[in-house]
Image (tube, helix red, strand yellow):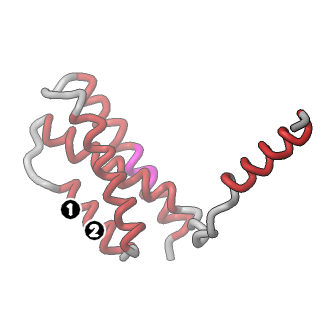
Amino acid sequence: MTRASAFLAACLAVSIVAAPLPARAAEAPFEPGLMRLAEVLGSLHFLRNLCGEKGDQWRVQMEKLLESENPDPDRRARFIASFNRGYRSFSGIYTQCTPSATEAIARYMKEGETLSRDIASRYGN
Protein backbone atom coordinates (compact mmCIF):
# COMPACT_ATOMS: atom_id res chain seq x y z
CA MET A 1 0.00 0.00 0.00
CA THR A 2 1.43 3.34 -0.98
CA ARG A 3 1.74 6.19 1.41
CA ALA A 4 -1.04 8.17 -0.35
CA SER A 5 -3.48 5.28 -0.33
CA ALA A 6 -2.73 4.62 3.36
CA PHE A 7 -3.44 8.27 4.06
CA LEU A 8 -6.72 8.12 2.10
CA ALA A 9 -7.73 4.95 3.95
CA ALA A 10 -7.02 6.65 7.27
CA CYS A 11 -9.05 9.72 6.23
CA LEU A 12 -11.93 7.48 5.18
CA ALA A 13 -11.81 5.65 8.50
CA VAL A 14 -11.80 8.94 10.42
CA SER A 15 -14.68 10.33 8.35
CA ILE A 16 -16.75 7.21 9.06
CA VAL A 17 -16.01 7.36 12.79
CA ALA A 18 -16.52 11.13 12.95
CA ALA A 19 -19.74 11.11 10.94
CA PRO A 20 -22.22 13.51 12.47
CA LEU A 21 -24.77 12.11 14.85
CA PRO A 22 -28.42 12.65 14.07
CA ALA A 23 -29.29 16.26 14.75
CA ARG A 24 -30.95 17.10 18.05
CA ALA A 25 -33.40 19.89 18.38
CA ALA A 26 -31.66 23.24 18.41
CA GLU A 27 -30.79 24.39 21.90
CA ALA A 28 -32.60 27.49 23.03
CA PRO A 29 -30.30 30.49 23.44
CA PHE A 30 -31.12 30.73 27.16
CA GLU A 31 -30.38 27.07 27.87
CA PRO A 32 -26.75 27.51 28.99
CA GLY A 33 -27.83 30.25 31.40
CA LEU A 34 -30.53 28.03 32.89
CA MET A 35 -28.10 25.16 33.33
CA ARG A 36 -25.64 27.50 35.02
CA LEU A 37 -28.42 28.78 37.26
CA ALA A 38 -29.19 25.19 38.30
CA GLU A 39 -25.49 24.71 39.13
CA VAL A 40 -25.46 27.92 41.18
CA LEU A 41 -28.55 26.76 43.09
CA GLY A 42 -26.79 23.48 43.92
CA SER A 43 -23.71 25.33 45.14
CA LEU A 44 -25.82 27.63 47.30
CA HIS A 45 -27.77 24.69 48.69
CA PHE A 46 -24.55 23.20 50.02
CA LEU A 47 -22.75 26.38 51.07
CA ARG A 48 -25.64 28.17 52.80
CA ASN A 49 -26.43 25.07 54.89
CA LEU A 50 -22.74 24.64 55.69
CA CYS A 51 -22.63 28.21 56.96
CA GLY A 52 -25.63 27.98 59.24
CA GLU A 53 -28.75 28.32 57.12
CA LYS A 54 -31.06 25.45 57.88
CA GLY A 55 -33.56 24.27 55.34
CA ASP A 56 -33.94 23.53 51.70
CA GLN A 57 -34.67 26.96 50.21
CA TRP A 58 -32.25 26.45 47.30
CA ARG A 59 -33.54 22.97 46.50
CA VAL A 60 -37.07 24.41 46.51
CA GLN A 61 -35.92 27.11 44.08
CA MET A 62 -34.56 24.34 41.85
CA GLU A 63 -37.89 22.52 42.03
CA LYS A 64 -39.66 25.75 41.04
CA LEU A 65 -37.30 26.13 38.08
CA LEU A 66 -38.07 22.58 36.98
CA GLU A 67 -41.78 23.17 37.44
CA SER A 68 -41.74 26.34 35.38
CA GLU A 69 -39.66 24.78 32.60
CA ASN A 70 -41.56 21.46 32.55
CA PRO A 71 -38.63 19.81 30.74
CA ASP A 72 -38.69 16.50 28.89
CA PRO A 73 -36.90 13.65 30.72
CA ASP A 74 -33.50 14.24 29.04
CA ARG A 75 -33.52 17.96 29.73
CA ARG A 76 -34.73 17.36 33.29
CA ALA A 77 -31.77 15.03 33.82
CA ARG A 78 -29.41 17.76 32.60
CA PHE A 79 -30.93 20.27 35.04
CA ILE A 80 -30.55 17.83 37.93
CA ALA A 81 -27.00 16.97 36.90
CA SER A 82 -26.12 20.68 36.87
CA PHE A 83 -27.62 21.19 40.35
CA ASN A 84 -25.74 18.14 41.68
CA ARG A 85 -22.48 19.27 40.05
CA GLY A 86 -22.78 22.60 41.88
CA TYR A 87 -23.47 20.84 45.17
CA ARG A 88 -20.62 18.36 44.79
CA SER A 89 -18.12 20.97 43.67
CA PHE A 90 -18.14 22.40 47.18
CA SER A 91 -19.06 19.35 49.26
CA GLY A 92 -15.73 17.79 48.33
CA ILE A 93 -13.78 20.86 49.45
CA TYR A 94 -15.50 22.39 52.47
CA THR A 95 -16.27 20.61 55.71
CA GLN A 96 -16.86 23.79 57.71
CA CYS A 97 -17.82 27.36 57.00
CA THR A 98 -14.73 29.43 56.24
CA PRO A 99 -14.18 32.99 55.03
CA SER A 100 -13.67 31.67 51.50
CA ALA A 101 -16.97 29.75 51.74
CA THR A 102 -18.80 32.92 52.73
CA GLU A 103 -17.10 34.75 49.86
CA ALA A 104 -18.24 31.99 47.48
CA ILE A 105 -21.79 32.41 48.81
CA ALA A 106 -21.69 36.14 48.08
CA ARG A 107 -20.36 35.56 44.57
CA TYR A 108 -22.89 32.84 43.77
CA MET A 109 -25.76 34.93 45.15
CA LYS A 110 -24.72 37.77 42.85
CA GLU A 111 -24.26 35.45 39.86
CA GLY A 112 -27.62 33.78 40.45
CA GLU A 113 -29.35 37.13 40.68
CA THR A 114 -27.66 38.31 37.48
CA LEU A 115 -28.52 35.12 35.60
CA SER A 116 -32.15 35.27 36.72
CA ARG A 117 -32.52 38.91 35.79
CA ASP A 118 -30.77 38.54 32.42
CA ILE A 119 -32.71 35.45 31.37
CA ALA A 120 -36.02 37.02 32.39
CA SER A 121 -35.33 40.34 30.68
CA ARG A 122 -34.00 38.82 27.46
CA TYR A 123 -36.30 35.84 27.04
CA GLY A 124 -39.22 36.33 29.43
CA ASN A 125 -42.72 37.16 28.33
Q: Which residue is mark 1?
A: 60
Which type of secondary structure does the marked residue at label 1 adopt?
Answer: helix
Q: Nearer the viewer, residue 38 or 107?
A: 38
Q: CA distance from mark 2 to mark 1?
A: 6 Å
Q: Nearer the viewer, residue 80 or 115?
A: 80
In the rendered image, which quarter is residue 111 located in? top left
Q: Is residue 112 magenta?
A: yes
Look at the image and tell me in which quarter the N terminus lies. top right
Q: Is residue 25 left or right of residue 101?
A: right
Callout 1: few (<14), some (14-19), or many (20+) C-alpha neighbours within 10 Å?
few
Task: Say above or below: 67 vs 102.
Answer: below
Residue 10 position within the rendered picture, expressed as x and y whole percent measured from the top left: 77, 43
Circle 2/circle 1 CB separation < 8 Å: yes
Task: Say above or below: 51 vs 45.
Answer: above
Residue ranking furthest to the top: 99
Callout 2: few (<14), some (14-19), or many (20+) C-alpha neighbours within 10 Å?
few
Q: Is residue 90 left or right of residue 29?
A: left
Residue ranking furthest to the front: 1
Q: Main secondary structure of the magenta part?
A: helix
Q: Is residue 61 magenta?
A: no
> What numbered label is drawn on residue 116?
none
Residue 35 position within the rendered picture, expressed as x and y whole percent measured from the top left: 43, 56
* Image: magenta residue range: 111-115
